[in-house]
Image: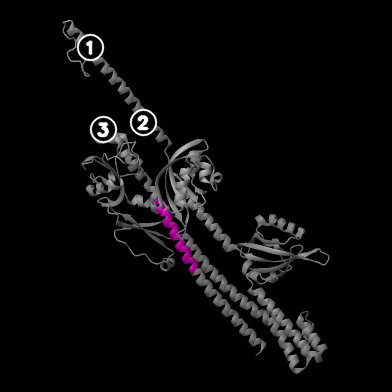
Amino acid sequence: MKVRTKLILLLLLLSAIFAAGRYFFQLFENKRMLILLEGDMKDKSFTFDGLMKLKGVSLETLAYDYTYWDEMVTFMQKGDLAWAEANLDEETLKTYQADAIWVYKTDLSQIHFVQSANVASLKELPAPIDAVKDILLKKRFCHFFVNTQAGLMEIRGSTIHPTLDAERVTPPQGYFFCGRLWSKEYIGEFEQLMEGVITINATKQATPDLKTLLKTNTVIFSKELPGLDGKPLAYLYTRIEPKELDSYERFSRYTAVIFIAFLVSVLIFITVSLTVLVNMPLDAISRALKTADPRGLRGLEKNTSEFGDIARLISEFFLQKEELVKEVNDRKSAEERFRQVADAAQEWIWEVDKNGLYVYSSPVVERILGYKPEEIVFKKHFYDFFTPETREDLKKKVFELFTGKNTFKNLLNVNLSRNGNVVFLETSGVPILGQDGNLIGYRGADKDVTARKKAEEEITREKENAQKYIDIAGVVMIIIDAQGKVSLINKKGCELLGYKKEEIIGKDWCDNFIPEDEKDKVRDLSDRMLKGEIEVNEYFENHVLTKNGKSLISWCGIILRDDKGAITGHLSSGEDITERKKAEEQQRLLLKDLEDMNKIMVGRELKMVELKNEINGLNQELGRPAPYKDASLNQTD
């Protein structure tokens, strides 16, 4: 088989290898897109759950705080409507973002109601009150959705108890319900925060599979809205078109176009190079050898390359042609192997002199920076590709390594490609020393890590976005990792503790922010959640140490799991109830003082009755009429 035929077959083989590589690369990209879509869907579903919980806190607080309150119990017993109109009015609805409040006695008769203009027709609880009563007698709290004339409404209810009965173990004094209408405006707030479209259906709808969603760059997830019986009353569907997936798809297409262009360029370059550098000299030598006439090599003898040497040797030592042909073949094989290794390498192999001037470059540089080796060798220094803002610092750092003749590895540097794109490279190099130990230059390789850096930047942006979401919350939000350390805290939490975020993140929560006498209780609860013994902690109180003292916080929390279900920490939201607890304690002490005073007054009255009875007896003994007609506790002079 002729050399030209072999070269053609080699080019065809390289083309097939590149085509196969592109095919498997596309399969990998498709799989990666599916993984990204699935992860994005889970992240957005988790974010939506958090938003629902945050926006539901005000309604939950209304149902909780107003139902263990002595004044509410008094109202249930006396029916003081003036008190109800002053404390359960439209201003209360606005404060807690509710649309209706219904209060019922224990016999299920309504004692008070108030509603916004949105639900003016709902004077009665839009649910079977006797069925709700049965639920509350078991759980003390209820949460469900109902369909009303005004639309879908979220209801929260609770039994009414005295202030001192925070655990609600005494018999209910009545029933309290509050509702919030899921209007277009309310749903629109979710849509704005999620940057998507939300629909609510009465029946469960089939959602497309991941491959179908990937084609439309769409994320869809659903949430069940429970009815009074605990079964789904409606289904909430959220449709989001993430900009990240669209950008990633465009980037993938752009990469494919570059890859194909690069493949064509490489094949053309190889074909032309082989034709000019190999085929033409070989043809002349081949004719000379076949005809045994070296005159056809005279033009080639002037060439300074290996082929010129061969031509001169053929002319001068034609009788030794077998040895010369073998040398040519050996040189040809060595060059071909080196070229294949350099072309197939994923890293850019280079060599520079002691001044940083390139004296060798592998062809991979064209894929990374867009320059051909001949445009770089003896024409460019390594620092010529650095971005202007980093050039001087990086140049100084590298030449310090040159001065020390140090080997370096994975030195990150920022470069500009021919088309102006930023390319991140990790550079490794070893010094080349002469026999006298002086530095001749450096030999090394560059690895393109641009994709990895962009992925890291994307992850950083996602974390920043998540931080923004929790920073808008009006309560403390904190994540404790599996080691008991703070891994995330929002702005409200920093304000409460009085420290900057960087002074809190990474510190052990119990060791640094919990009083000594409460550490065991808090750490035990945290450990139980991290072990999975408690999935959701709905209410827990403890003090936290702040920069200015202590605050009492009421917490609710859930455990966090990774994609494999392993527990990674727990998320808790807390509300500062220090001032409220102080007010409750002051009220308790006042009631005790009143009770003590009442005991003193009753004792004084009893003594007066005894004295009057003694006077009446003395007068009777003396034959006089009794001055006091009836000496009793209610007798007046």
Q: Is residue 3 left or right of residue 62?
A: right
Q: Is residue 464 above or below residue 81?
A: below
Label 1 packing within 10 angstroms: few (<14), some (14-19), many (20+): few
Which quarter of the image is occupied by the N terminus? Answer: bottom right
Disc 2 to disc 1, how far (Cα)?
A: 40 Å
Residue 594 placement (x, y as % from top left): 33, 25
Dot 2 crowding, Cα within 10 Å, few <14, some 14–19, many 20+: few
Q: Residue at x 24, y 51 (%)?
A: 149
Q: Which residue is mark 2?
A: 588
Q: Would you name the residue on which mark 3 appears? A: 82
Question: Where residue 508 appears, x then y in whole percent?
Answer: 53, 46
Q: Secondary structure at mark 1?
A: helix
Mark 2 / mark 1, whichever is N-terminal: 2
Residue to which mark 1 is pinned: 614
Amino acid type, label 3: Ala
In this rendering, which labeled residue sits more in front, label 1 or label 3? 1
The picture quadrant where one finds residue 348 is bottom right
Q: How is the image coloured?
A: one colour
